[in-house]
Image: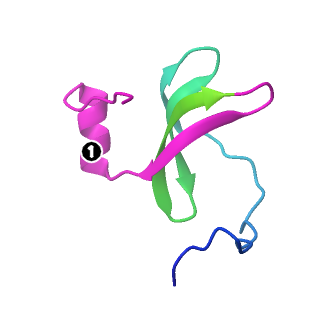
Amino acid sequence: MTWQPDHEGFPPWSDDPLVPQEVLYSFDGPVVFVAQVGLSRTLFVKFDEGDENSFFHASQIDDDHLLALRAGKLSLRER
């Protein structure tokens, strides 16, 4: 199955608010944080914000990469 931009997507499986489990960097609110999404631990990195919205890159993250990020052995940067 391929994504087709002219078709509607599936409705969200939940409209519960996203609750950060661990905030790794904050500036006027969480900028980099980890939250549980379904069965996956997910890393969120803010890349833009509008008047009423914030936009985040989101990616599943495992324990090894999260430990490396906390220890400063792995860094994040915007391209």
Query: Magenta part of the protein: which range?
Result: 50-79
x and y, in percent, of residue 63 in the image? 30, 49
Report the front residue among 24 and 8. Answer: 8
Q: What's the image's color scheme? A: rainbow
Q: Quadrant of residue 13?
A: bottom right
User: Which residue does the image show at 79% across and 24% down from the upper left?
Assistant: 51
User: Which residue does the image show at 37% across and 51% down from the upper left?
Assistant: 61
Q: Does 48 appear in magenta?
A: no
Which image quarter is the C terminus in?
top left
Q: Quadrant of residue 68?
A: top left
x and y, in percent, of residue 56 in the image? 56, 39
Which residue, given by chain and number where applicable, does mark 1 sit on? 65
User: Which residue does the image show at 50% across and 47% down from the upper left?
Assistant: 58
x and y, in percent, of residue 31 in the image? 54, 26
The correct choice, above or below, for 3 with respect to 48 in the image is below
Q: Residue furthest bottom?
A: 1
Helix, strand or loop under label 1: helix
Q: Residue furthest front?
A: 6
Quick check: 34 left or right of 4?
left
